[in-house]
Amino acid sequence: LMAPAGAGNAWPLTEGEAGGGWSSMRMRSRRSLRSVRRSLFGKRASRIDEASRLEGEVLTHLVEGQRQLRSEFEQLREETVVSMLKFEQCSLRDDLARLNTTTKNLVRDEMHQVVEDYEAKTRATVSGLAGRVEAMGDRLSKIQAQTKAVEDVVGETLRKSQGKYISALSMCVELKDGLKREAAYLQGVRGKLRALAGPGGAT
């Protein structure tokens, strides 16, 4: 009952097609068998009818057998498909379980590696920072010592400059007083010159 080679997914004829095929075959068989029956039995109608009846029963059994085989094959195919699907499902479940386990192991290993790398980098960073802090502490101590020395020098300079500033300020006051006296003197001289020039003289 399998499909002929080259038929692709062709399937045995349906019941109607099978019935039509058997009907046409039955008609051809009857035409061919009539000549055989006539040659064997002559024109005796009873034997011819018996042979026709037997022929019809045989053809009926063949059609029924084909229908039953088709039904069994359909059932077998469905069972095969279901079995294959179940097997594929079990196989996929096993593959998924293995993939899940492998993924968990990979993630765990990767996380361990990431943590180790991070801890190593952190230790290196902390060590480097500690060294830099210590170096900065040394530099700060040196800067503080230099600042103290500068403060001492500036303080001494300011003390010396303060005395000089006071002296300079006194000199400025004296100079200012002298300038005032000179201005008054010049003013008196200018008045005398005007008086000597008389009216209409140059100013």
Image (cartoon, rainbow, N blue to C red):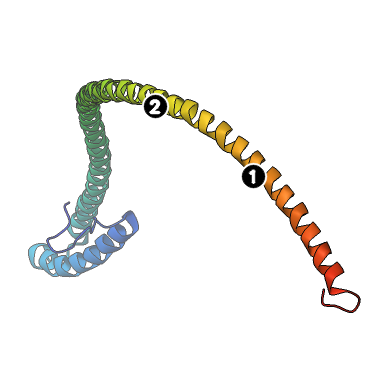
> In x, y percent, where is residue 199?
91, 76
> In x, y percent, where is residue 129?
28, 24
Comparing marks 2 and 1, which lies closer to the viewer? 1
- Residue 38 lies in quadrant: bottom left
Taking the image as drawn, is residue 112 in sight? no
Name the residue at 75% across, 58% down. Answer: 186
In the orientation shown, which residue stands out farthest toward the front?
Answer: 196
Name the residue at 27% across, 35% down. Answer: 82
Q: Left or right? Give the position of 15 relative to 168.
A: left
Name the residue at 36% across, 24% down. Answer: 149
Identify the amino acid type marked 1. Leu
> In x, y percent, where is residue 126?
27, 22
Question: 93 above or below 17?
Answer: above
Quadrant assignment for the C terminus: bottom right
The answer to whether the residues at label 2 and label 1 have Cβ atoms under 8 Å apart is: no
Q: Which residue is mark 1?
A: 175
How many discs appear? 2
Q: Distance of mark 2 from mark 1, alpha carbons?
A: 32 Å
Q: Count neighbours of disc 2 (C-alpha within 10 A) and say few if under 14, some if 14 to 19, many if 20 or more.
A: few
| 186, 109: nearer the viewer | 186
Name the residue at 23% across, 63% down. Answer: 26
Badge 2 or badge 1: first in the primary sequence = 2
SS type, badge 1 = helix
SS type, badge 2 = helix
Question: In the rendering, which numbered label is found on residue 153?
Answer: 2
In the orientation shown, which residue stands out farthest toward the left?
Answer: 40
